[in-house]
Image: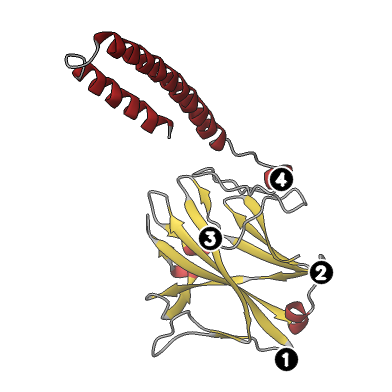
Amino acid sequence: MKTGGLWLATAMLAVSVAGCSSGNSSSAGENTEKLKTEISKLQQENKQLKEENDKLKADALTVPVNAEEDKGGVELIGEGAGTPAADSGSGQPVIVKGTPLVIDGVGEYTITKTSYAKKVIPSKPGSFYTYYEAKEPGTTYLAITLKVKNLAGEAMDADAVADMQIKYDNKYEYSTFSTMEENGGEDFTYTSISEIEPLKNGTLVYLAEVPDEVESGGKPLYADVKIEGETYRYIIVK
């Protein structure tokens, strides 16, 4: 509204000046002075409105963060840092499913899946494939899938990628062995005869034959994963 008033006053001033030659010069001069005064007032108001508008914009850009939001921040693994974001409460660093653990110049390690099965088969079984079956009654396989990208300048031995130890209820320990997928997940092969070439990926599955109670008991369950001399805790059940 104020901007429109300024424009209208300016237009009236132009009309008045144009009509000075045909009207009373004294009257025209008074009208001109009045219009100048009005324009000056409108300009001042317009300046004040602009300053208020700029202040409102500046205030809108400052969004306060309340205490609850600040406490709820999620820590992330820094790019290339090679260290996890938190510890397990026991002083050990953790590795989290779906979150890559990057060790510069060595590898990128990501746990992608944890499952139980009496019979473990490749992710995309072909016509003929190797499988692993729990033989003892009342037992099943706990399978942890680890995807690895080799960031080193030479081939990585698959059987040296990681070691895993399972612990249930904070006292029952179970060892694991590993196998590696090949042909895009159509089959398994031995890690002892396999390598992962530089900048290529390998999918390893770590297997522990455990009592059925481990799956159904609901008690604390975790795997200690040793990679490059550092042990990381993978918490399965808190």
Label 2: how many Cα within 10 Å (few below 14, some 14–19, many 20+):
some
Q: Are marks 4 and 1 in contact (CB under 8 Å)?
A: no
Amino acid type at circle 4 is Lys
Which residue, given by chain and number where applicable, does mark 2 sit on?
169
Label 4: how many Cα within 10 Å (few below 14, some 14–19, many 20+):
few
Residue 51, image x, y percentages = 49, 24
Circle nearer the N terminus (2, 4): 4
Q: CA distance from mark 1 to mark 2?
A: 21 Å
Mark 3: secondary structure:
strand
Q: Are marks 2 and 4 in contact (CB under 8 Å)?
A: no
Amino acid type at circle 1 is Pro
Q: CA distance from mark 2 to mark 4?
A: 30 Å
Mark 4: secondary structure:
helix
Which residue, given by chain and number where applicable, does mark 1 sit on?
137
Q: CA distance from mark 3 to mark 1?
A: 32 Å
Which residue, given by chain and number where applicable, does mark 4 sit on?
71
Q: Are marks 4 and 3 in contact (CB under 8 Å)?
A: no
Residue 238, image x, y percentages = 76, 65
Mark 2: secondary structure:
loop
Pick the residue in front: 147 or 187.
147
Which residue, given by chain and number where applicable, does mark 3 sit on?
110
Residue 218, image x, y percentages = 78, 75
Task: Quadrant for residue 10, please give it.
Answer: top left
Name the residue at 48% across, 84% down. Answer: 130
Nearer the observer: mark 3 or 1; the answer is 3
Label 3: how many Cα within 10 Å (few below 14, some 14–19, many 20+):
many
